[in-house]
Image (cartoon, rainbow, N blue to C red):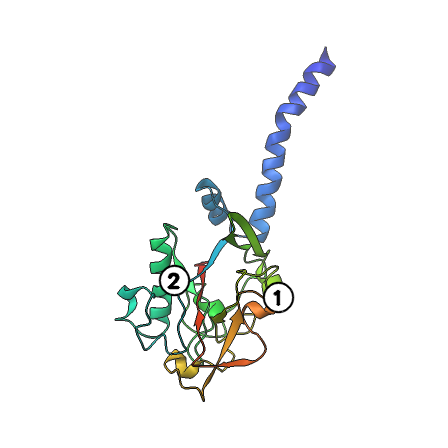
Amino acid sequence: MCFNQCGKTKASVLPFLILFSLANIFCQKADFVGISKRIAEGRFGIDVFLLEAEASGDFLNSSPPGWPSPCFGLSGIERANCFCQAAGDQQGRRREYRAWLSITSVVDAICNIQGQIGQGCGVPADLGPFQMQHLGKTLVIAWDYGELSATGSRAALRNNAGLIWTGSDASGRASGDDCSGWTTSGGAMFGTAGSQEIPGTAFSDLGISMPCDSLGTLLCFERTR
């Protein structure tokens, strides 16, 4: 009789012990309050998506067709962030989004998606996971920032060919090539771009700078902090 009662007691305590252990791990490795909030809202991870429209390298100083028009009164990284936010709102995402975009001597992409306008910011290695919706499924791009910055995206972001204007290496730091702060489409100027269809570090940097009269889009990240 005692054996049965003891067995039942242990069984009833087991779920609590599992939850306590998971909570302890999360507290040690990440923001438990933030994670708990995401889980309560039915989501987990950092949402990522691509803009549908494309433009040449002067998209921060022009009014490219197909890009969210409410942002045309802004300039610099604020305009880029507005493009991502407006597109996210139009798609019903209901989160805050910022552009994976660097501007030389102004902002690093990895700082921007953390809500900071500047360069050289610190980044938690366990920031993540980064994921996006692809063909009706959730695609994990990288489990954390350590993986994203070292080996890049686990899979292609989109099946079709196309460029992504980034001005950044895979770690999200400014590369120095940014079409004069994304204000010119002059063919003699260049900008760092990633690929929509090639996985790995090419998601942010193809390894060659592209002429600013090329067409590219923006990669948008849910604000992480």
Residue 187 picture location, percent across and down:
44, 86
Query: At 33% from the left edge and 70% from the top edge, which residue is drawn?
Result: 79
Q: Which residue is mark 1?
A: 200
117 or 193: nearer the viewer: 193
Residue 214 picture location, percent across and down:
45, 78
Closer to the N terminus: mark 1 or mark 2?
A: 2
- Quadrant housing residue 150: bottom right
* Residue type at numbered disc 2: Cys
Vertical relation: 193 (above or below) 11? below
Report whether 196 appears left or right of 56: right
User: In this view of the protein, can residue 172 be seen by the observer?
Assistant: no
Measure the alpha-carbon separation of dots 1 and 2: 23 Å
Query: At 41% from the left edge and 84% from the top edge, which residue is drawn?
Result: 180
84 or 110: nearer the viewer: 84
Residue 209 picture location, percent across and down:
53, 81
Q: Residues within 10 Å of mark 1 (few under 14, many from 20)?
A: many
* Residue type at numbered disc 1: Gly
Task: Locate the N terminus by quadrant.
Answer: top right
80 or 199: nearer the viewer: 199
Q: Which residue is mark 2?
A: 84
Which residue, as the protein is rendered here, is positioned at the far bottom?
188
